Image (spheres, helix red, strand yellow):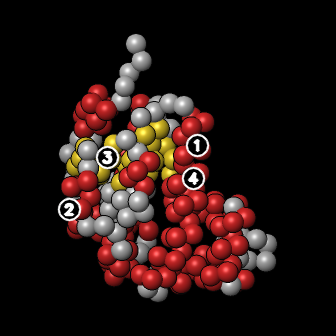
């Protein structure tokens, strides 16, 4: 079983993913972390980003120059699409290799799972949801970001209603207990070996 875990910024999807891993032993592929790794480690991704952004995309010691990439990425939807067209296929291929090696139930955590077109590599979609104002407060506190900055990031993600319509299971993270919801999800979707 390949589980997709998604939700808007501040919804608690990373917390839910961590709980699935710690409590139920399901390995989780963190697409954000792995995308950052691939942007440095993958020769093809590195060359494509340098072609798109110039040599300034990387520091002299070979690390990704995050301010340069972020400036380009958040300048327009067209720019974001160009970067995503380079990074998303690499992440998808890396996830598939990783999942095959694991040969067990696994999860893919991604804030933009639906937008990135990763639904075709998961068997079920778990959406973590919370009210917008609560998500905003959580993201501002977690990231030390201002309201305007967080709202811009929220605007780049799929509408919550779009995610809910695509969901196979919804976890509501608005202060109610998460453990019973997680246990119910596992009971319904994860095949237990006899």
Rounded to the nearest angstrom, the CA distance separating label 3 from label 1 is 20 Å
**Residue shown at 37%/41% (left/top)?**
123
Graded by Cα atoms within 10 Å as few (under 14), some (14 to 19) or many (20 or more), the crowding at tag 3 reads many
On screen, 115 above or below 57? Answer: above
Residue 63 percent coordinates (x, y): 71, 70
Q: Residues within 10 Å of mark 4 (few under 14, many from 20)?
A: few
Identified at 41% across, 35% down, the residue is 1
Mark 3 and mark 4: span between their CA atoms? 21 Å
Judging by the rendered image, the residue that carries numbered circle 3 is: 126
* Among the two numbered marks 2 and 1 on one chain, the one whose residue lies closer to the N terminus: 1
Label 3 element class: strand
Label 2, residues with CA under 10 Å away: few <14, some 14-19, many ≥20: few
Gap in Å between the C-alphas at discs 2 and 3?
14 Å
Q: Secondary structure at mark 1?
A: helix
Which numbered disc flags the more N-terminal residue, 3 or 4?
4
190 left or right of 96?
left
Say which label, 1 or 4, has the lower sequence index: 4
What residue did someone put label 1 on? 98
Q: Of the two numbered discs 3 and 1 on the same chain, state the one appearing first in sequence.
A: 1
Mark 1, Cα crowd under 10 Å, few <14 / some 14-19 / many 20+, is: few
* The furthest residue to the front: 120
Q: Is residue 3 left or right of residue 85?
A: left
Q: Secondary structure at mark 2?
A: helix
Kindly identify which numbered label has been placed on residue 93.
Answer: 4
Q: Position of residue 85 (x, y in %)?
A: 52, 70
Query: CA gap, disc 4 to disc 2?
Result: 28 Å
Mark positioned earlier in the residue sequence (2 or 3)? 3
Nearer to us of marks 3 and 1 is 1
Can you tell which mark lies on residue 74?
none
């Amino acid at each position: 079983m390949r589980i997709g875990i998604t939700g808007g910024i501040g919804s608690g999807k990373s917390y839910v993913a961590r709980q699935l891993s710690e409590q139920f032993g399901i390995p989780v592929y963190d697409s954000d972390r792995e995308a950052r790794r691939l942007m440095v480690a993958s020769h093809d991704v590195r060359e494509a980003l340098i072609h798109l952004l110039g040599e300034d995309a990387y520091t002299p010691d070979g690390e990704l120059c995050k301010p340069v990439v972020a400036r380009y990425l958040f300048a327009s939807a067209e720019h974001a699409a160009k970067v995503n067209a380079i990074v998303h296929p690499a992440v998808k291929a890396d996830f598939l290799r990783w999942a095959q090696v694991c040969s067990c139930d696994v999860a893919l955590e991604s804030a933009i799972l639906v937008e990135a077109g990763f639904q075709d590599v998961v068997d079920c979609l778990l959406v973590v949801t919370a009210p917008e104002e609560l998500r905003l407060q959580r993201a501002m506190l977690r990231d030390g970001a201002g309201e305007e900055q967080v709202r811009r990031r929220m605007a780049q993600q799929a509408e919550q209603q779009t995610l809910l319509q695509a969901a196979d299971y919804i976890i509501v993270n608005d202060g109610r207990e998460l453990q019973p919801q997680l246990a119910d999800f596992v009971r319904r979707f994860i095949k237990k070996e006899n």
